[in-house]
Image (cartoon, rainbow, N blue to C red):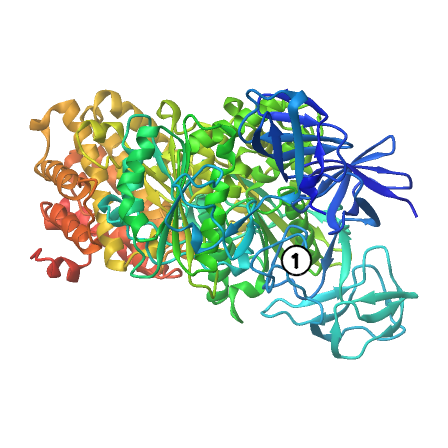
């Protein structure tokens, strides 16, 4: 056996000398407490290891034990409805204080109901489903033949209760268990990538109407502190139509994690059958937990997502916040004396971000099913400066960008998604989907909304110079319509009991209602009606209907719109 | 064997706050260190170990140290301190050494000063307020038990007075309460003012003061907040108290972190602060919270001065990214002679909705909406003159002045009940036409005598 020992400790960076073999990204156990660490550089018999626990008390000459395997995630029953740390060790049921010696709880000893789906003698290929284990809610675990294996089923376990590491089948001479391990930094293989074609309905109007995304897409959400990143992502986690949500809290607040977990456990799944938590896997690496585990946390999250994707599910990964793992990379790089690039970040930052977002996609799985991984990552730019490296690099690799605007947030306009600073590269594909799903005008409506908002911004800037009275009546009609668009359609309080989530029909109805009112206003203005007359009209019925109508009540929206249009007609 | 018995004298380097000693064996990272130099004892923490070298950060600084007359002893483990109720009623320096003529503080238990992360699944989401007796906070940016809510201020504004007032007056609905006050880089005059204002709380045995004054060693400030939080965690989670930790001024703390980083030749980040300042600050602020199934709570109120009033400066910016809202003080309101000069529109308590009653939330939302509208009216008045304002706008101007004098303004020793605060909020709102009060439900309007 090779021997390895610590030569240097500087926070999470540990240098090790070793005489035997040691591989890049190998997992090692450091010191008397066997702290987990990962080899990130090797040179002349010395290795640099990043430690995933507090290294207080660790000394030169302490032993280091190579494990011979890379850092892996344990994939199997027990993931749904639980909270894990960045190394995917269970936190649920763990001690109050997380110490290197007692890092979390344990799933050992749990047993799961297994229902076989194949017969002895049958031929199965990689990715084929051997059987299922029911989940706590509507999502069942499909136990698959691991990538790279396959053959004839030599034996299959009968229906019954099994432990995570019990053998449930022998295929081609290889033993298969309920739980499999997979290295977190390696994307799980698929049969082929296929073009994403189905929108992810988020229930947030500004997203679904203006900056939508496809199942299998990627979005970055940059915004200064307090602009609403976490609330927006949590709303999407609660209400979007993905099958499985992997929520990775990365270097953020403990109270927020407690809140999201409590919420998910309290809320019933809108798609029936249990609680929202039952289709959620939460990965928590709060800002005071060991810093380097932030990076593994996001990789663990995508690995878990790929695992469920391979079962044929649509999975959403939420990473809040990607800036915090980028900072962990920077911190580590600076301790190893790596030459810094922009703002101290290592030159590898952009490839690290690209590799992360590349793991999203719509695929044909090895087993021949359709599945997808969608990634939404928050970005926390220092000082709200959107030119900083993490924001600038992320923008290059994502299909969608939702920039949160400090001025909108300051005016308590939530979600504070900027219409001028955001984009959706999936919009064309989604337009085609909307046409075939009963909304032929979706793309035209979207274009009209965007141009209305842009036009209003231009006019507002003008009005600040010459005063609003200097604008012509049709221009003031545009300003009024845009205000209605913001207040009646785009605003959506996460706290509203009826409007926290908005169904597709209600969202479309609201947008079309305001566009219709806008058309009428413009016509009135062009007919010579003074702006003051229509500005004094009470639009309350239209502005409030988002809160008073239920999430799927598009009829109420149409009624409110008719009331307002009738009021306008009566005026003239 | 007592590890402190072995002493190393091969001091190779002294520079800034750092000491490098060679020939050491078995020294661990983050260990506590005693340094005997010229008849004095100083203290330090191990920043790095490599082979037989240890880099030590000297809390008292290296001023006057002679390598030839310096001996370094390692404690064999990271710093732990005694914790327990013995800290209550005591005043100590920034390293926890009493300066009140009392004996050293001993306790029934020990705790590691570095703390340990709280398992997020064992956290109890914050709820229920800490009532501070200050209308601006209780009424509009409610402080919630287990929250971290900073005060963002600027040089010259009365943030210390406000923080002290909060420390003196706060209560948690009659449940056992305590304040741990960590002063970082305070002037002696300020330190005396703090002690005077908190004398009552000290006499009641509900207060611990840790004071690092402006002429105390700068590097000591790195330890002070950690001591404060370690003491607080024990008072909260073992003794069952609701503990408010006031840390002022965190900008001075961050400067000490920057100084150590610069001495180590680390790559500087924004404004020369190290890249790990976010994680460093988080390792303090995140120690607030509640634990499910236990009685106490730790609430953290950091105070910081924004250099040149710049909210994008790394210290307020990173703090804002960690804390759950912010209370912002405004020089304009202070210039108008109003204390406390809280700028309600830029302030926010993100957890208020968990700590305030529904009727309270309605009034607060209406006050905020009215303030926003009053601000627009004020801007308009600047352009067109007060004569050009509509009647409604004039009502809003009137509301704002009543808000400032009746609700916001209070004297530094006045402790208002929540009911009194809400009464004053209603009073200010009552000058607005009824149709403007759209965020208040009908029955509330009637109950407060605002008739249709
Ligand atoms: N959609 C929303 N509905 C209602 N309130 C919101 C919404 N979005 C944000 N808020 C308000 O803004 C506050 C801050 O939002 P949030 O915590 O999401 O900010 P953030 O961008 O994640 O900030 P940080 O970067 O500091 O984590 C919330 O506590 C809430 O009061
Ligand atoms: Mg957030």
* Chain of the residue that carries numbered disc 1 in the rendered image: A
Name the one closer to the observer, A442 or B432. Answer: B432
In front of the other: B228 or A87: B228
Q: Is residue A570 visible?
A: no
Give residue B69's position: percent from left, percent from top.
Answer: 65, 23
Q: Work out whether B19 lies above or below A70.
A: above
Q: Where is residue B30 drawn, in percent x and y?
A: 64, 39
Which corner quadrant of the image does residue A413 belong to? top left
Residue A511 % position (x, y): 37, 47
Report the residue at 30% width, 27% height from top.
A459
Q: Is residue B5 left or right of residue B122?
A: right
Quadrant housing the C terminus of chain A: top left
Crowd tier of the residue under label 1, counting other residues whose Cα lies within 10 Å: few below 14, some 14–19, many 20 or above: few
Q: Is residue B59 left or right of residue B349?
A: right
Between residue A242 and residue A26, name the one nearer to us: A26
Within the displayed image, which quadrant is ligand 1 positioned in?
top left
Q: Is residue A453 left or right of residue B165?
A: right
Whether residue B427 sits left or right of residue A124 in the image: it is left
Residue B11 appearing in the image: yes
Q: Residue at x 10, y 34 (%)?
A: B390
The answer to whether A559 is drawn above or below residue A55 in the figure is below
Give the total of numbered labels.
1
Residue A269: x %, y % from top left: 50, 66
- Quadrant in the picture for residue A365: bottom right
| Residue lying at the far front of the rendered structure | B39
- Residue bearing mark 1: A102
Q: Secondary structure at mark 1?
A: loop
């Amino acid at each position: 056996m090779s021997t390895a020992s610590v030569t240097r400790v500087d926070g999470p960076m540990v240098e090790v000398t070793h005489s035997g073999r040691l591989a890049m990204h190998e997992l090692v156990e450091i010191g008397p407490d066997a702290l987990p660490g990962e080899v990130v550089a090797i040179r002349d018999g010395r290795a640099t290891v990043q430690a995933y626990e507090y290294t207080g008390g660790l000394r030169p000459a302490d032993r280091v034990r190579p494990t011979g395997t890379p850092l892996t995630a344990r994939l199997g029953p027990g993931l749904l409805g639980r909270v894990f740390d960045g190394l995917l060790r269970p936190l649920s049921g763990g001690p109050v204080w997380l110490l290197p010696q007692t890092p979390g709880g344990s799933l050992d000893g749990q047993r799961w109901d297994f229902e076989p789906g194949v017969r002895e003698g049958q031929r199965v290929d990689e990715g084929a489903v051997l059987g299922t284990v029911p989940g706590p809610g509507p999502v069942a675990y499909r136990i698959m033949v691991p990538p790279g294996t396959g053959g004839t089923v030599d034996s299959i376990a009968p229906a019954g209760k099994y432990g995570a590491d019990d053998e449930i089948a022998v295929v081609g001479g290889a033993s298969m268990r309920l739980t499999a391990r997979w290295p977190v930094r390696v994307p799980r293989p698929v049969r082929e990538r296929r073009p994403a074609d189905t929108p992810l309905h988020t229930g947030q109007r500004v997203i679904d109407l203006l900056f939508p995304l496809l199942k299998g897409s990627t979005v970055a959400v940059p915004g200064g502190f307090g602009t609403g990143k976490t609330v927006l992502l949590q709303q999407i986690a609660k209400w979007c139509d993905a099958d499985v949500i992997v929520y990775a809290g990365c270097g953020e607040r403990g109270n927020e994690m407690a809140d999201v977990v409590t919420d998910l456990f309290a809320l019933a799944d809108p798609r029936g059958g249990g609680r929202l938590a039952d289709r959620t896997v939460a990965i928590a690496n709060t800002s005071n937990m060991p810093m380097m585990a932030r990076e593994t946390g996001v990789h663990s999250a995508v690995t878990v997502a790929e695992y469920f994707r391979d079962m044929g599910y649509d999975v959403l990964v939420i990473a809040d916040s990607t800036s915090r793992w980028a900072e962990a990379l920077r911190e580590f790089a600076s301790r190893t004396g790596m030459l810094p690039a922009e703002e101290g970040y290592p030159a590898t930052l952009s490839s690290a971000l690209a590799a992360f977002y590349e793991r999203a996609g719509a695929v044909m799985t090895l087993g021949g099913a359709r599945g997808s991984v969608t990634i939404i990552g928050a970005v926390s730019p220092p000082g709200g400066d959107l030119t900083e490296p993490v924001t600038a690099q992320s923008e290059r690799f994502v299909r969608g960008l939702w920039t949160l605007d400090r001025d909108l947030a300051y005016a308590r306009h939530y979600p504070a998604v900027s219409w001028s600073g955001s984009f959706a590269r999936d919009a064309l594909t989604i337009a085609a989907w909307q046409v075939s799903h009963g909304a032929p005008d979706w793309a035209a409506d979207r274009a009209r909304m965007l141009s209305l908002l842009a036009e209003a911004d231009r006019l507002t800037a003008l009005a600040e110079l010459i005063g609003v009275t200097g604008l012509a009546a049709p221009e003031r009609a545009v300003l009024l319509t845009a205000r209605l668009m913001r207040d009646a359609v785009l605003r959506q309080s996460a706290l509203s009991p009826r409007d926290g989530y908005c169904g597709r029909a209600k969202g479309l109805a609201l947008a079309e209602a305001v566009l219709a009112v806008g058309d009428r206003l413009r016509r009135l203005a062009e007919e010579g009606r003074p702006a003051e007359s229509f500005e004094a009209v009470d639009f309350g019925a239209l502005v409030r209907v988002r809160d008073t109508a239920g999430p799927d009540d598009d009829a109420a929206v149409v009624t409110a719109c008719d009331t307002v249009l009738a009021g306008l007609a009566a005026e003239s | 064997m007592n590890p402190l018995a072995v002493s190393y004298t091969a001091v190779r380097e002294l520079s800034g706050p750092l000491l490098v000693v060679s020939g050491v064996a078995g020294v661990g990272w983050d260990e506590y260190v005693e340094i005997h130099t010229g008849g004095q004892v100083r203290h330090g923490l191990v920043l790095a170990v490599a082979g037989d070298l240890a880099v030590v950060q000297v809390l008292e600084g290296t001023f006057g140290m002679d390598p030839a007359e310096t001996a370094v002893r390692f404690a064999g483990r990271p710093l732990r301190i005694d914790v327990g109720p013995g800290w209550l009623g005591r005043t100590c320096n920034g390293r926890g050494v009493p300066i009140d003529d009392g004996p050293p503080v001993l306790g029934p238990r020990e705790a590691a000063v570095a703390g340990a992360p709280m398992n997020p699944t064992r956290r109890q989401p914050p709820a229920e307020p800490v009532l501070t007796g200050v209308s601006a906070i209780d009424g509009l940016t409610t402080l919630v038990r287990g929250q971290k809510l900073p005060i963002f201020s600027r040089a010259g504004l009365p943030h210390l007075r406000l923080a002290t007032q909060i420390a003196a007056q706060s209560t948690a609905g009659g449940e056992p309460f305590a304040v741990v006050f960590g002063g970082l880089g305070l002037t002696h005059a300020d330190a005396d003012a703090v002690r005077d204002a908190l004398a009552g709380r000290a006499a009641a045995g509900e207060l611990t003061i840790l004071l690092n004054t402006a002429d105390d060693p700068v590097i000591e400030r790195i330890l002070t907040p950690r001591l404060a939080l370690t003491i607080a965690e024990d008072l909260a989670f073992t003794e069952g108290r609701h503990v408010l930790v006031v840390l002022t001024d965190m900008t001075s703390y961050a400067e000490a972190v920057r100084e150590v980083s610069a001495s180590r030749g680390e790559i500087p980040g924004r404004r020369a602060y190290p890249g790990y300042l976010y994680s460093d600050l988080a390792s303090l602020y995140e120690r607030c919270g509640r634990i499910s199934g236990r009685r106490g709570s730790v609430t953290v109120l950091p105070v910081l001065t924004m250099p040149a009033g710049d909210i994008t400066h790394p210290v307020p910016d990173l703090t804002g990214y960690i804390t759950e809202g912010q209370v912002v003080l405004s020089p304009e309101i202070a210039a108008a002679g109003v204390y406390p000069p809280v700028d309600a529109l830029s302030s926010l308590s993100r957890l208020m909705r968990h700590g305030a009653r529904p009727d309270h939330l309605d009034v607060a939302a209406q006050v905020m909406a009215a303030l926003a509208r009053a601000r627009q009216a004020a801007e308009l008045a600047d352009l067109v003159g007060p004569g050009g304002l509509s009647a409604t706008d004039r009502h809003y101007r009137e509301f704002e002045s009543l808000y400032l004098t009746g609700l916001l303004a209070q004297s530094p020793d006045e402790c208002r009940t929540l009911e009194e605060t809400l009464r004053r909020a209603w009073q200010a709102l009552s000058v607005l036409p009824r149709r403007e009060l759209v965020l208040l439900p009908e029955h509330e309007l009637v109950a407060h005598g605002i008739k249709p």
